[in-house]
Image (cartoon, rainbow, N blue to C red):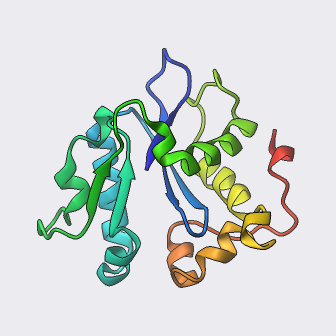
Amino acid sequence: MDTVCGLQAESDCFLTLLWKKSKFMLIFKLKNQTTDEVSRIFKIFQNLIPLDVYKNLFSIILTNNGHEFFDVNSIECIQDTGEYVTHLFFCDPHMSCQKGMIEKNHEFIRYVLPKGSSFKNITQEDCDLIMNHINSLCRDSLNGKSPYEAMLFLCDEYILKILNCYYIVNVDVVHLV
């Protein structure tokens, strides 16, 4: 889990979550880089995804020491019941290489929104479109399959649809620019 920020003067950013085995990434627009916004996204997950599937998909999360992740209970526990379901781990300080795969995947976002771009007018629907293009891009490391196709081994397609994820045929993320 990580965040991607737009212009420094603006508070808008994205929350990204990546499943390492499938290279599948979710992208959510945050109004600002705060614990309240991260908690809001996890509350959405908890309301949309059946509990048994949620526990499986979010059993372990690795992130950096960003201040937006400091409300550990809102991430590790079901917010309505307090049930502990997720193990949250933090990288060592200044060691982004410990979560290098998500950093590499952020490069796809930067093809569309280069560093220094404003995220202010980017909507969640725009994030969904970017995410779905990235997740539909076939990768050699997945034997020519896309992260979307690989994720289907980890959860049912109806879960992906709940999260506004879909497959785009013949995608080239570079053409989104």
Q: Position of residue 11 (x, y in %)?
A: 43, 25
Give the residue displayed 56% in from the left and 69% down from the top: 21
| Front-most of residues 131 and 93 | 93
Give the residue displayed 48% in from the left and 14% down from the top: 9
| Front-most of residues 18 and 133 | 18
Q: Quadrant of the C terminus?
A: top right
Residue 150 as seen in the image, left or right of residue 95: right
Which quadrant of the view contains residue 114?
top right
Q: Position of residue 106 (x, y in %)?
A: 62, 43
- Asked whether the viewer can see residue 126, the reply is yes
Q: Position of residue 123 (x, y in %)?
A: 57, 43
Q: Does 61 sit above or below residue 65?
A: below
Residue 142 as seen in the image, left or right of residue 75: right
Task: Residue lying at the far top in this picture: please name it.
Answer: 9
Which quadrant of the view contains residue 107?
top right
Residue 86 as seen in the image, left or right of residue 108: left
Q: How many marks?
A: 0
Q: Does 121 sit above or below residue 82?
A: above
Q: Does 122 sit above or below residue 49?
A: above
Which quadrant of the view contains residue 94?
top left
